[in-house]
Each structure stands twice: as C-alpha cells, then as structure tokens.
Image (tube, rainbow, N blue to C red):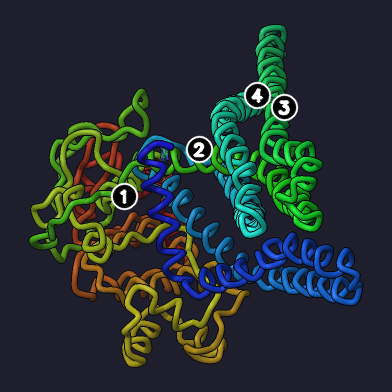
Amino acid sequence: MSDTVIRSIRQFARPVFAAHRRAVAGLAAWSLLEMVPALVSGRLVAAALDRGFLAGAPGTGVLLLLAYGVAMLAGTLAVRQAMPHTAVLVESLRDALVRMVVGASLRRAVYGDEVADAATVSRITRQAETVRQTTAGLLMTVRGVVFGVIAAVAGLFSLDPLLALVAAPAVLAAAALLILLSRLLRRRYRRLLQTQEALAEEAAACLSGVRDVVTCGAWRTAGAGLRRRVDDEAEATVSSARAGTGRIGVIALGGRLPFVVILLASPWLVSRQILTPGTLVGALTYLLNGLDPALRALVQTIGNRGLELTVTLHRLIDHAAAAVSLPSGRKRPGGAEIALRGLTFAYGEHAKPVFSGLDLRIADGEHLAVVGPSGIGKSTLALLIGGVVPPRSGTVTLGGVPVGELDEPALRSMVALVPQESYVFAGALRENLAYLRPSVTDAELDEAVAAMGLSDTVRRAGGYDAETPAALSQGERQLITLARVYLSEARIVLLDEATCHLDPVSEARVEEAFAARPGTLIVVAHRISSAMRARRILLVEESGLAEGTHDVLVHRSPGYAELVGHWAPAARVP
Ligand SMILES: Nc1ncnc2c1ncn2[C@@H]1O[C@H](COP(=O)(O)OP(=O)(O)OP(=O)(O)O)[C@@H](O)[C@H]1O
C-alpha cells in the first residue's frame, strides 16, 4: 500500500478506534473467550481417551467430553457477544470513510474541475457500502482465524512440542504463499474493477447519446467500442478467477500437510510410545477442527473479501487523497474591504471566461446591488467574492489578504453567501436559526425573527424549541435561512437571489434589515426595487462592469435601461 493510503487509513480509522475504546476492549475480551474451545479441544479429547475410555474409566471420559461441550457453548456465546462491538466499530469506520471521501469529492467539485454528478455519488456510496460489509465480515472472520491458528498451534505444543514443530513451519509456509498470491490477486482484481468501470462509462455514454449515435450512423463504431470493453471485462474476470485457484495450495500446505505427516508417522510414534493414542487423536482434533477450518476461512473469506476490501479502499482513498485541498492559509483579514484586481475566471480550461481582467472595490459597510442579464456571471461573481471558487488569474482580496491565503474558518465566519436554495434541516427551530452562532440569546432571536417577518411562523410552530415544521412554504424556508445569516457574525453578506420566493413587501423588509445590520450587503437583484434600495448598483455586461446609482445608470446605460424595462411589470406587484 502506498504511504498516502496508509496515512489516510490512519487518519480516518485512528479517531474511530480512539473514540470507541470500550468497543475495542469488548471485542478483544470476547475474542479471547472465543478462543477457549479451540485451545482446549485437543487436550480434552486426548485426556478423555487416555484417562477415560482407554484407561477403563468411561465416566471420566464422558465428563471430559462434556467439559469440551461447555467450552464450545461459551465460545458460541462469545461470538454472539462480540457482534455488537463489531457493529459499533464497523458503522463508525464506514461513517468516517464516507465523510472523508464525500468531503473530498465536494472539495473537488467546488475548488477543482470535477463535476460531482449522480454517478460519482452513486459510485462512492457503492464502494463505501462494499467497505462496510466486507469490514464487518472480515473483523468477525479475522478474529476467528487468528485465534483459531494460535489456539491450534498452542494446543499442539501443549500436547507435545514435537507436534507443534511439524505444524508451525507448514503454517508459516502457507502464510507466505498466501501473501505472494494476494499481490497477484490484488493486481488482477484491480484490473477487473477498472474494466467494469470503463464498460459502465462507455455504456452510459452510448445510451445517453443514442439519438446522436443513430443520427450520425455511428452505431458500428459505438458498438465496436462497447464490444471491446465487454471483451476486456471478460478477460479480466477469467484471469482473476485463474489466479484464485492458487489458493487451494494454501489450504493443502498449511492444513492438510501436517495432518498427513502426523497420520503417516502415527504407527511409528505410537508403537515407540512417543505419543499416546489419546495425544494422537487430540493432535488430529487440533488439526482438523482448529487449523484446517481457520485456514479455509483465511483463504476463502479473507482471500476474497480482504481482496475486495483492500482494492476498494485503495481506490476510495486514492480518490480522496487526490482531492484538491481547501484554502489552507493561516492569515486573518485586516478589515472587510473587498478588492478584485485583474480577475479572470472560467469554469473549465477551454470554457469561455465569465470574467476577464475584472477590477472592483467594495468598501466595508457598502450596500451594493449586482444586476445584469441572465447567465452573465452575477452568481459567479458572488462565488468569487465569497472565496468559494478561486480565480484563474488575478486576485480577490478581503481586508487586503488574498482569499486563498486566508484562514478558512475565519473566511467562512466573515462572509456569508446565501443562495437561492434554502437549507432548513430537521430539528428544533432554535437549532436552525442559531446554527451559525449557537450562543444567540432569546432576545436576539426575537429581534431577528421580527426583522425577517418570521414571528407568525415561529408562533405557529410553537416557539424556538419546537420542531421545525416539515410543511414550510418556500418563502418561510428562505426567511429561516436569512434569519440564520442575520444572526451570524458575518461582516459581509451576499444575497444571491436569496429572496426570490418572497413577495416584494417581505423582500423589502429583509433587505432593509440587512442594510441596517453592521457590515457590507451585496444583493444579486432580481427586481428593480432591490436595485433601487442599494446605494450603488453594479451592472454586469458582456462588455464589462458599469456602476452608479439607479438614476445615473438609467440615463447612461442602455443595458440597464433595458433591464429596468424587463423588470417594470414585476416592480408594480404590490
Ligand atoms: N458550475 C458551472 N459549470 C460550468 N458553467 C457554469 C457553472 N455555473 C455557471 N456556469 C456558466 O457561467 C456563466 C455565468 O453563470 P452565472 O450563474 O454566474 O450567471 P448569472 O448572471 O448568475 O445567471 P442567472 O441570473 O440566470 O442566475 C453562464 O454561462 C453559466 O452557464
């Protein structure tokens, strides 16, 4: 495994084990108890024969066999008791893994070039689920295998060190063979996964563009491409299965070879009284009931599931490790002035730039409206100012510090970007409203709720500690989101059509409240009334930026006059 993968596993697994010490201790304790039947089996069988049935004391023999039965019952109980501890660890590991990988995907989608589409999410979910299921199975099996092998070898040693001397080298040789084989299997399985994904991608591309494929008469080419992928996958499946047959050798070497050797030597060993008949049967019990099933489980479960787990985990972690890192600066802004200098931005390497060489300065405390035709780049400008997307060239500075060099939490608490979509989650109203500043007092909540016009909604819900109603209107959801930001410590608030579901009166109330709140207010306006309330209006056009007050722009800018013409009917809505 690469260093990155090992580092990433430590990064997500260590806190899980640290946070669940009780589960780890519980699992270890029950696992030790689970080992008891395997440890005592051969000894009890040997004693039952030598001191019981063969010594003319069948009662003693029966009692010793009964003791073996009790040990087996205790072992079964231990397996059952270990399960909840395993579940706690596995579920937490899965959550940590999903958080790490999904977080990485989101970072890539926001800061990098990856599109976080449904296919990416579904692939990650599927792979994380595979990791969860295989980890659960593996944790249970690995314990059985490790303790089974230790118990069998220790039991053999306690019967006669000579027996352990025969079994131990064979077990070590089997383990070495399994390690070598695992490398080959891992390579082949990884190739199998790659071919499966390539096939899924090719099939999805062909199916989504089937009309174009047929229209262009390209179905032969498309079919040939698909067939190639199917053949690749079939070939990878066969070669993976072929490599898997080598695992029989592991069982033969570790489980069967010591059994055959001891069995062949048994007439000599017993006749020379090196071993008693009971010891011989006890040894075979250790080999057949302990070592052989443990090795089978090792090969079948760990060989298959372990392989699946390592390859899938590797791919998930590679995906996460390759993610674009968050702005990781340490600097704090030296004020709240926003400055854009020579800013150029495009959504892709070959996409047409949304902005080229843009310069803009917004002083602390300004109330600015951003207007312009649809698709011109108003939301993109808000994302750039909020440090959500980095410029391709040029700089965006907050308080004199380039956004990328700012301490991320400081940036997020200083700038609040409210989009059109409102995020209201399940839980008490107070949790929703105070999410960005949990220390708010009831008096502050009252003030914010009144300023946003939410008092009726809160009263109907039953107060701040009542559950947030599930059936809220789009407008109420927007108001809750807005109140949350109003209550936050954000010095710069960007409303990107965040009032689109409000009627003009509510919208005016909200904007006036935000304008009266200390700090900068930038509104991506969708009504003329919003623009008219601002002290400065920024018009984004193909040709660049124009700015001024409403009266100035309406006379000087044909683009602005045209927008006002579009908006005029909406402005008359009461
Ligand atoms: N995630 C994205 N990936 C690729 N292109 C995008 C993305 N988001 C926006 N664009 C494109 O960038 C340009 C500017 O979009 P933006 O959403 O900033 O415009 P807007 O002025 O806010 O539009 P509207 O008023 O309709 O919301 C548009 O051509 C849009 O198609």
The residue identified by callout 4 is: 199
- Disc 3 or disc 4, which is closer to the eye? 3
Q: CA distance from mark 2 to mark 1?
A: 27 Å
The residue identified by callout 1 is: 388
Q: Quadrant of residue 466?
A: bottom right
The residue identified by callout 2 is: 315
Q: Position of residue 157 (x, y in %)?
A: 61, 55
Q: Left or right: where does residue 492 sit relative to residue 435?
A: left
The residue identified by callout 3 is: 245
Residue at 36% from the left image edge and 23% from the top image edge: 350
Asked whether 332 or 294 is in front, the reply is 294
| Residue 144 shows up from this direction | no
Crowd rating for badge 4 (residues with CA inside 10 Å; few <14, some 14–19, many 20+): many
Element type where label 3 sits in the image? loop
Q: Quadrant of residue 197?
A: top right
Q: Earlier in the sequence, mark 1 or mark 3?
A: 3
Asked whether 210 or 160 is in front, the reply is 160
